[in-house]
Image (cartoon, helix red, strand yellow):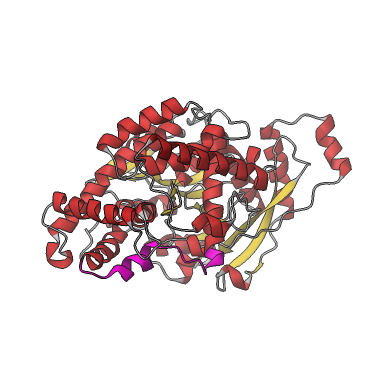
Amino acid sequence: MYGEAYLTGTRAKKRTAAIGSAGTLIAAALIAGAVTAPTASASTNSTDRHRGYSEAQGAAIAAARAAKAGIDWQDCPADWGLEKPIKCGYVTVPLDYAKPYGKQIKLAVDRIGNTGTPEERQGALVYNPGGPGGSGLRFPRRVVTKNAVWAKAAKAYDFVGFDPRGVGKSTPISCVDPQEFVKAPKMDPVPDTEADKLAQRGLAREYAEGCYERSGEMLPHMTTPNTARDLDVIRAALGEKKLNFLGVSYGTYLGAVYGTLFPTHVRRMVVDSVVNPSREKIWYQANLDQDVAFEGRWKDWQDWVAANDAAFHLGTTRADVQAKWLELRATAKKNPIGGVVGPAELISFFQSAPYYDSSWVPVATVFSKYVAGDTQALVDAAAPDMSDTAGNAASENGNAVYTAVECADAKWPTSWKRWNRDNTLLHRDHPFMTWANAWMNLPCATWPVKQQTPLEVRSHNGLPPVLIVQSERDAATPYEGAVSLHSRFKGSRLITEKNAGSHGVTGLVNSCINDRVDAYLLSGALDSADVVCEPHAVPKP
């Protein structure tokens, strides 16, 4: 949801990939498979049993241990897809921070050194791309590929990525067999009858049960505060006294929680495309808000398609484009295209357009080809690749982590009456994503482990100014989230990209934004007041 955009089955996978450039997909880059440290000895476990630790004490113990151990950097395993000179390693953290000497897990990290001189180096810049469930391991590749947007920052910083707990190489969790997870076509997310809703409720309950059966030991500890504690342990293992952090999408909530828990450990923090950190929003209401924003951005894309009818031949008005979308959807519902692309798969593919401007042309092109008679282009784009076992495992793992974190972070409504009422009302005016989003999150209504109370995000003494970047019409993280965080983090600055809606703004070419991000990272410089930037260039067919 709050990261890379795709949907598999009844759960719309909406997770950001602000990796490399905005809109890059990461599904195939993850291979589930991590090294789990052995359980601590009975003697050290007895330390936890006989002395109660707060999670803050446990985090301090783990960080001190990591600072002493450091990271044993090695060439990355060949199947990780991370070329030299990127180095890889592991950082050990407690599964439960209240038991710092108990069960340990390992987190995969990677880094590439700064490209400038030793004198220019300002430490490590640690990155999270969103999700929950996104991998940050491809972040150092921005240096390898000579990404111009990040060239100045790369001179000063080592670029460091990591797989959060439960993700990819970091003790991955699972809820269902990956090949079953991606199998298509899935049930239409938009219910026609009460029987349809009952079937979807059954699928959601089964999914929650599968998470517990396959990953029960991890589930109680799959929370954003624990990931923030992991982030502080990584900081210590890197030998950094203070953290430099770049978080996109869900990564902004991770940053907000980190800044609240560890205000004096922050040096520089950039948060881009902001999750609303209000306790009242995390996570049930945040998803409902997202449905409204997706509808608005979907219409923006349709307007652009209509304005470029000479290229796409899908109609000269938004209504024309919507009519063709509804016709396509009805066709796929009656007879899945190519036998595998039904309405669920269509939403999976088409939702990338409201997510990212970089998807506007590719999605419109495939749509145009289909209307012109080329059904294979749509099948190739929207159907799962059953032969891609590694990619399917990554997809299933990402969805499992998304669900586990959001369900554990907050108490969700358990009344189906409320879910049904809220989503039925919302769907009337915002039909594009509402029910797909509801089914994706419904496992949280029957989640089998204790759900926490979200942290009250706010700045405390010692937190330096944070730079907040947000597009005005973002679908995945509505603009109000940036305003909310801005009000909570005193001294923060908000850069608004007006009349724009791409998700993951810092990876786009817009000098008004890029120059300010560079200035902040390189010298800590901020404008005396908030800034409004003109939008980046609109895509051209």
- Residue nearest the observer in this picture, 187 or 86: 187
State the image coordinates of residue 237 (x, y, percent, origin top left).
66, 52
Q: Is residue 482 above or below residue 9?
A: above
- Residue nearest the observer in this picture, 270 or 353: 353
Residues rendered magenta in the picture: 372-391
Is residue 116 in sight in this rendering? no
Q: Residue at x 85, y 41 (%)?
A: 44
Q: Which quadrant holds residue 348?
A: bottom left
State the image coordinates of residue 55 (x, y, percent, origin top left).
67, 33
Q: Residue at x 45, y 47 (%)?
A: 10
Left or right, 302 with reference to 3: left
The quarter of the image holding the C terminus is bottom left
Q: Which quadrant holds residue 263?
A: top right
Q: Is residue 397 magenta?
A: no
- Residue nearest the observer in this picture, 191 or 325: 191
Q: Residue at x 59, y 43 (%)?
A: 227
Q: Farthest residue toward the right? A: 43
Q: Is residue 378 magenta?
A: yes
State the image coordinates of residue 377 (x, y, percent, origin top left).
32, 69
